[in-house]
Image (tube, rainbow, N blue to C red):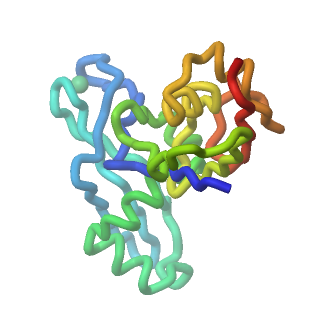
Amino acid sequence: MLPWVVRRTRLPLLWLRCVGCRSESATTGEGRFRVNANGKLLDVWLLVRCVSCGRTGKLTVHERTPVGSFDPAELDGYRAHDPELVASRLLDPLLARRNRFTLDWKDAWRLDTPPARPGEAWPVQVEVVFADPVPVRPERLIAQGLGLSRSEVLHRVKCDIPLRRPTSTGFAFTVMAGD
Ligand SMILES: [Zn+2]
């Protein structure tokens, strides 16, 4: 079975309305947290910036959370703006729900496919793995990966999940020979 891997190439932008200019695109830039102590309680935010006017906003990561309940390594990560922690918080669906934004993955990911083997016999089985939770439409991903038109994909691909519904969960499919 051929492995295909979907992975991010950078952090996605955010669809988030700016209170200053009403633009709907924001970025975390290189990724910065702000940690604010209030007695034994901590607030942690992830900073975002409006792409059009540069206004800074804050996404709530932790709100009035007892210091003692933090994993010390996690707290160090917030204070050091650890890029892995920035990515894992930004891609956490709970953060998006809480702060009412959606991720804009345009041009922020790629599909890695192994080189085609000449003389490969049909049918071909492919397993798609997600290194990052990028929502993709299987139909489009398969068309891109195989260089087929979308109607050919619908004709020739057998798959257990709906081809037109975006997913970021691994799946497998089989491509039958063309006519
Ligand atoms: Zn703005």
The residue under the point 56% across, 80% down is: 69
Q: Nearer the viewer, residue 10 or 45?
A: 10
Task: From this view, report whether residue 6 is shown above or below residue 159.
Answer: below
Give the residue at the far left of this rendering.
53
Residue toward you, 149 or 166:
149
* Extreme residue toward the top, this view: 151
Name which residue lies at 61% across and 54% down: 2
Q: Which picture quadrant has residue 83?
A: bottom left
Position of residue 25 relative to residue 114, above or below, is: above
- Spot occupied by residue 115 in the image (x, y as percentages of width and height): 45, 50
Query: Is residue 179 shown above or below 40?
Result: above
Q: Give how far across and how far down residue 117 sits, in percent.
A: 51, 49
Q: Position of residue 27 (x, y in %)?
A: 29, 39
Residue 107 image-quadrant placement = top left
Q: Is residue 25 visible?
A: yes
Which residue is pictured at 55% across the width and 50% down the height? Answer: 4
**Can see residue 98?**
no
